[in-house]
Amino acid sequence: MTACPLGLAGQCYCANQVSSFASSQLPAKTAVLLLAHGSPENPAQVPEFLSYVTGGRPLPPPVVEEIRRRYSLIGFSPLACWTLLQADQLSQSLQMPVFVGMRNWKPFIADAVKAIAAQKIERVIAVCLAPQNSRTSVGLYRSAVVGDGNLPFQLDFVDEWHDQPLLAKAFAENLRAGWVKANAEYGGTLPIIFTAHSVPARTITEGDPYEAQSKETAQLVAKAAGLEADAWTFAFQSQGMSGGTWIGPTVEETILTLKAKGHTGVFIHPVGFLCDHVEVLYDIDIFFKQFAEKQGMRLWRAESLNGSKTLTAALAQLVRSRVETLTT
């Protein structure tokens, strides 16, 4: 048996394709489909992965090489592993089959739809593992599921769940644990930067709710963690390399602002991501940490939700509420 890249004892969801949510074990008329961005398994797959991200539009070779370099530095992106684990935990909680579909890598959304159809499932509750609604993420996931529109099942698509109370609780749990430890190491109280992935500015000016919802999630997490208003701020990370303006402020700008106020350390908590992947493992753990060090500052971050049981409870509550709607 191949060793689990995450070091998980027992089942491994990526190396050995093991799961406990096979629908042969859990026959049902209703299933859940978790949707995520997808991630290459190794740096050599980056060019093919990027072709899915851009819809076949070629990127400049320096951009491809830079992204490949980032994946080389982290060695392995565990996004699929954590997503499959989250699906398994959710299936066990709900006692329902839970499928996983990725927009830009295996297991692809189209393949998940085919697998669901083969199981003769009548209703599917689709949940994006991007709680804040944007046409650049959630909108594209919906299109990938719907395809040509001839779905063999009834689709209940969850467009947003950024304000789900248990989601805020899950983030707050990791925030408190990591922040208390970091403050002890620092010897003081670190300012907190909540982050979410940036999107093109035109997306927001055209009415996309993503920016407001990302900030609302941060506010709910801060409240759940019992933070004072002046204990935290918000920034957008991972701005794209393509042309055009992306929303900010950036994390780099925010670090400089905090430095100007006399801070020599910072604590980052991404609330737009539900597990570790390149935007966490490279952008925060490598790039932002090095940027902070060059400014004479230290940087810590909260652990990602990954296999959080509170995240599982949030997803389960979300699905149950949709099931009740379908049956009334």
Image (cartoon, rainbow, N blue to C red):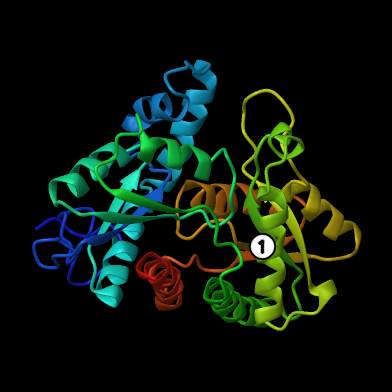
Q: Residue furthest front?
A: 328
Mark 1 crowdedness (10 Å alpha carbons): few <14, some 14-19, many ≥20: many
Q: Is residue 220 visible?
A: yes
In the visual, does 18 lie left or right of 173? left
Residue 83: image x %, image y %? 35, 57
In the visual, does 247 lie left or right of 9? right
In the displayed structure, would residue 148 be above or below residue 59? below
- Amino acid at pointer 1: Leu
Question: At 24% across and 68% down in the image, what residue appears?
Answer: 96
Residue 80: image x %, image y %? 33, 51
Q: Quadrant of residue 8?
A: bottom left
What residue is shown with label 1? 299
Image quadrant holding the N terminus, namely bottom left
Nearer-the-camera pick, 121 or 13:
121
In the displayed structure, would residue 220 be above or below residue 215? below
Nearer-the-camera pick, 327 or 204:
327
In the displayed structure, would residue 320 be above or below residue 102? below
Q: Quadrant of residue 219?
A: bottom right
Question: At 31% across and 55% down in the image, what residue appears?
Answer: 124
Image quadrant holding the C terminus, namely bottom left
Nearer-the-camera pick, 261 or 154:
154
Question: At 14% across and 61% down in the image, what residue appears?
Answer: 22
Residue 10: image x %, image y %? 17, 71
In the displayed structure, would residue 178 be above or below residue 155? below
In the visual, does 49 lie left or right of 117? right
